[in-house]
Image (cartoon, rainbow, N blue to C red):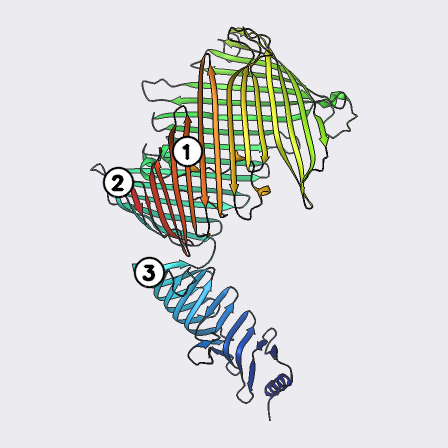
Amino acid sequence: MMDICNKKWLLAALCVLCAAPGWCQLPERAPGDSIAFDAAEVVYRVRAKRVELVGNATLRHRDILLKAGHIIYDQNTRTVTARALPDSTGAKTRGLPEFTRGKERILGTYMRYNLDTERGRVRTGRASHQRKYYRGSHIVIEGQKALNAFDLSLSTCDLDHVHYDFLCKNVRILQNDKAIGRSVTFRIGPIPVFWVPFFVFPVKQGRQSGLLTPGVGSNDRDGIFVRNVGYYFAPSEYWDATLKGTFRERGGFLLESRFVYAARNRYSGAVDLGYDRNTSGGSAAHNWRVNLQHQHRLNATTNIRGRGQFSTSTNFDRRNSDNLYRYLNRQLRSSFSFDKRWTESGRSIDGSLTYYRDLSKKTNSFQGFPRIGFRQPRRRIFGGDESTPTSDRWYRAFYYGFSSTLSNNFTRNPDPTPNTERVSLQNLLTVNSQHRPMGWLDLTPSLNLSEELIYSDADSTTRRTSYSAAMTSGTTLYGIFQPHIGRLRGIRHRLQPQINFNYSQAGSIYGGAFGVGGNRNWNDARRSINFNIGNTLELKTQRGDDFHRFTLATLNLSTGYDFDAPGQKWRSLRTRASLKPDRRVDVRIAMTHGLYDDAGNRSLLHPRLQNLSVTSNFRFAGGRSDPRTQTSDFSNSADFGFERDLYSDFASAGPWRFNLSHHIAMRRFGNTLTKTSWVKADLGVNPFQILRIDYAINVDILPNAKLSAQSLSLYRDLHCWEARFSWYPTGFNRGFFFKINIKDIPQIKIEHRRGGFGI
């Protein structure tokens, strides 16, 4: 007599035989342990407790999905066997087994997997995980934690005939951790390039421990060198460490370490230590370099920061750095600072200690040792800080602000240069107000009082005092039109006239002690008035249901009159204008006109042109990009031509682009007139999205026509590889650069720069 389990199996088989083709489900042995399957043909072996799925077979269990031409499920052993089926000719197979679990995917000619132990075997297997592809003659699956493989090929190339791979005799892959390979050969195509007895490959994203990718190169100074030989250690999400070395054919070696730590919203910092053993001079020289930095958030309103740079050599960075800034920097800077603020009142206090070491002059400067500052931001004088209606008393619109800074600066210089010392206390009080007496007129009075008390062994001034008062008045007038011409839906002209009157005076006290006693000397008071008129023309267009607003043109005029200036009292008339008819076109104009003739006589109605500059930018690109989304701020756009670094990449997403800039300037010095002009152009094409060609040229037109710079850059997409070539035939950075590297492993590369090569 059949047991209960056999009865359930028979009942399920009878139900499936009587039902239409489709997904079927075997009864559960435990909650969540059901098996669903589908196939073109389902054969039930009731006595043997087996199910055979033939043709487009699919079996699903928990997070496992298995597809194959032929699948056999054995209920007794809970084992699944999958293989491909021969096609109609018998020469080829169809339905290769495909095993998927989460993001893991394994292909093979034959698979056997146990659902309980989660162990299995794959013949001639192929697996993919996080853009990495594995191919092995034999793969062993050990649960959800590990894979063992033999004769495994690892690559980021997804082709059957890979462009490169790491061939491992045997390897163990720990899920979401690393792959440890033995007898590893790096091959480009079928050609072996180098061999290592073992290697560790990362197979998870994010920070992880592992060996660094070394590089080999050559230059005129060091000869052949091997760099980046070391290990990266990341045991925690709160800290990590790196230890690496550079070994040179000539000149010894360099050891570097870096320790980084961080806790979100609490503290962070780093410690960098470098040791250089230099044997290029015949005898060994030992030099050190230490960099420290730390920042700590004690609470929501209090922070401390510190950084330090120390070195035993004045040329440490020049010998060991390829970074241009570090190579040219001749200062070591160390500092410590803190800041504290009070949320309700807005007051804040901060302090710092700063030390500079000049490597060239060998001087030590202590700037702000210490420096302590206090600041009271803008605050209402009468009535407190609570918000009030606009109809409140006029005197409640007056505000004040105050700041004070104590600073102690001194230097320690080598003989015979004398040392210096300076202590100062600076105080600044500001009072201002804002009024609109008629609802449309802006009236802003302000008063500034500044005082500095000084003690210095090099300056006899012991106190400086100054005060200034200003009254600014202006308004904004609008002219709005709403035409319906093509896509044009609105025109707005904004006129902003403004007048500003200033009165200032400064005085100094010489002698005495820290501003007490001594002789006071007041400078003559200065009075001036400034005039400014701003014009802005804005347009609104419509495309479908979308409205677009942009600034078409601007025009700003400014001048002033100095009541107490000797001789010519009217300042020059300055004009600034811009025209942007399209986001791809930008024209900027700057002019200065003198309001006096050659004899010094006032000529307000016939101003004389002194300076003129016109800069025009035109940038166009083909493809699907919407010109409305392109940037209109050409001053912040990416440099091109000779302004771009020789070794940097260039981007060209569309099939082509063209950039053109022209600049012309004129300057008058008395009777001498000088002119300068240049044209810069950049053309990039990318017709097939695999080859990008970029050519840039810069031509000086005035004062002498000459070709100042040009460059040619090429980028070739080589599937899993990429190659770059940049050539500067003329100009100050004359030379060429070539690099070919793996896209997903950019550390594996071959490159050539001026003065050497690297791998």
Q: Up-down: is 235 above or below 2?
A: above
Q: Residue furthest front?
A: 485
Rendering coords of residue 662 (x, y %): 48, 31
In terms of image quadrants, where is residue 605?
top right
Query: Amino acid under label 2?
Result: Asp
Instruction: State whether residue 111 appears in this view.
Output: no
Question: In the depicted view, which residue is nearer to us: 240 or 132?
Answer: 132
Dot 1: what SS?
strand
Q: Nearer the viewer, mark 1 or mark 3?
A: 1
Label 1 CA crowd tier, 10 Å (few <14, some 14–19, many 20+): many
* Residue 471 screen position, x and y as percent: 66, 16
- Local packing at callout 2 (Cα closer than 10 Å; few below 14, some 14-19, many 20+) is few
Q: Are marks 1 and 3 in contact (CB under 8 Å)?
A: no
Along the line of sight, which residue is nearer the eye, 600 or 199?
600
Q: How many marks do you count on the picture? A: 3
Can residue 575 be seen in this snapshot? yes
* Residue at x 47%, y 21% (from the top left corner): 666
Q: Residues within 10 Å of mark 3 (few under 14, many from 20)?
A: some
Residue named by callout 1: 698
Q: Is residue 632 left or right of residue 419?
A: right
- Name the amino acid type tagged 1: Asn
Image-based side of 468 in relation to 190, left or right? right
Q: Is residue 285 above or below residue 653?
A: above
- Residue highlighted by disc 2: 220
Q: Whole-Å distance between the Cαs marked 1 and 3?
A: 43 Å
* Proximity of marks 3 and 2: CB atoms separated by less than 8 Å: no
Mark 2–mark 1 distance (CA, rounded to whole Å): 31 Å
